[in-house]
Amino acid sequence: MADVLLSLIMPNDVAQHVEDLLLSRPELVRGFSAGQVDGHGAIIPLVDPGELVSGHSPRTQIQTLGPEDAMRQVLALIKADLPRANIFFWLLPVIESGRL
């Protein structure tokens, strides 16, 4: 089965919990990358005064690569463990991956 890229965008206060969940399931997640991104747009709630001034909200993005069924299991685990975490996700097919 071909790999897919799972991308997750979440509030920073949820990120550590999601990272711990991913690390606890090495049979599903071989590894992942995490970094800071800025959330923009009408669906992003701006709460802190700094967010209101800057017009964006800090978020964490986590990306992982694996078989589609494993990535769907990861989504189900996150949904069960954090049902109201406000995590946006997407899955994309991967044409090729490797190391250089």
Image (cartoon, rainbow, N blue to C red):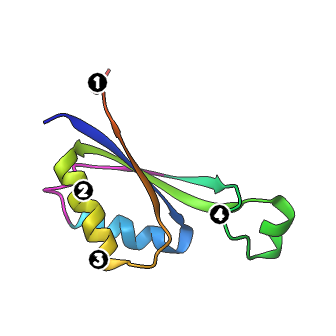
Label 1 or label 4, whichever lies nearer to me, is: 4
Q: Which mark is residue 71?
A: none
Q: Is residue 33 magenta?
A: yes
Quote the CA–CA distance across marks 3 and 2. 12 Å
Q: Which mark is residue 72?
A: 2
Give the percent coordinates (x, y) of residue 50: 81, 69
> Vertical placement of 6 versus 20: above or below?
above
Q: Residue at x 65, y 57 (%)?
A: 39
Q: Looking at the picture, which amino acid does disc 1 mark?
A: Glu
**Alpha-carbon distance for marks 3 and 1?**
31 Å
Which label lies toward us, 2 or 1? 2
* Mark 2 residue element: helix
Give the foreground label among 3 and 4: 4
The answer to whether the residues at label 1 and label 4 have Cβ atoms under 8 Å apart is no
Q: Residue at x 53, y 59 (%)?
A: 60
Say what amino acid the circle numbered 3 marks: Ala
* Residue of label 3: 80
Residue 86, given in percent of the width and then of the height, sits at 50, 71
Which residue matches tag 4? Answer: 43
Q: How many marks?
A: 4
Q: Is residue 28 left or right of residue 89?
A: left
Residue 54 at x, y = what percent? 82, 59
Give the quadrant of the C terminus: top left
Q: Earlier in the sequence, mark 1 or mark 4?
A: 4
Marks 3/4 in contact by CB < 8 Å: the verdict is no
Give above or below for 1 relative to 96: below
Q: Amino acid at mark 2?
A: Arg
Question: Residue under circle 1?
Answer: 96
- Is residue 39 inside the magenta stretch? no
